[in-house]
Image (cartoon, rainbow, N blue to C red):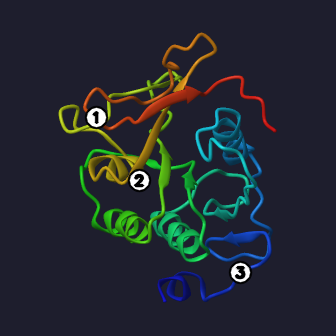
Amino acid sequence: TILGACLGGATNPYGVNVPLTSELPTDLTGHGVGVNSVFLNNNLVNPEGGNFTFVNAKFTSGDTGSGTLGSLLCGIYYLVEEGANPINISAGFDSPQDTFALIDKAVRFAEDRGVVLIAGLGNGIDDGSGTRVGYNVGPRSGMYFEPASSIAKGNLGITVAALDQLGDLASFSNYSTEGFMSLATNGTEIEVL
């Protein structure tokens, strides 16, 4: 299977680290946990209520918050094969290209199995002073944030931008005037369940 090729088939009750390490797939920064809390607090998934089981697929190394494209893709395949639905992809990378065949393949793999992908549009780029500034995602701007851009252009899931406490687009959040954004929700001062 694709999972076996990515991971050697190894899993544990807590999820998986991609690439495989002996550490538990713990969200050391709280970012993924925070994003999941936003979805639950706003009834964005399963509005009728019910039980959720969040499966972790951590593709970053230690507490650095950085990972590889291969690890991200293996994480998507792992979650699809484990039956996770929806899948929150609380990560990604800036790209000046509009297509990545490997990302498109993973997105379609999930879609072919009825899995909804939910991906953040990203937290902007450094403006040179250490401040992150959001940018417009789409063909006219020539900037993309993957895997959200691949999900959006194929209409294969939900892409999310961040709002501040006043309900305005957060200054750091990417956005799209070109149809690459499905919705915007709390992105600052988040209460984590």
Label 1 sits on residue: 179
User: Which residue lies at the image location 44% right of the left edge and 45% below the top edge?
Assistant: 158
Label 3 sits on residue: 11
Q: Is residue 132 left or right of residue 17?
A: left
Label 2 sits on residue: 147
Vertical order, 163 against 45 (above or below): above
Quadrant in the rendering for residue 110: bottom left
Sequence-first disc among 2 and 3: 3
Q: Are marks 1 and 3 in contact (CB under 8 Å)?
A: no
Pick whichever, 78 or 49, lies toward us.
Answer: 49
Whole-Å distance between the Cαs marked 1 and 3?
A: 37 Å
Q: Amino acid at mark 1?
A: Gly
Q: Is residue 73 left or right of residue 75?
A: left
Whole-Å distance between the Cαs marked 1 and 2?
A: 15 Å
Sequence-first disc among 1 and 2: 2
Residue 82's spot in the image, x, y percent? Answer: 61, 75
Q: Is residue 41 left or right of residue 93?
A: right
Q: Amino acid at mark 2?
A: Pro
Quadrant in the rendering for residue 30: top right
Q: Amino acid at mark 3?
A: Thr
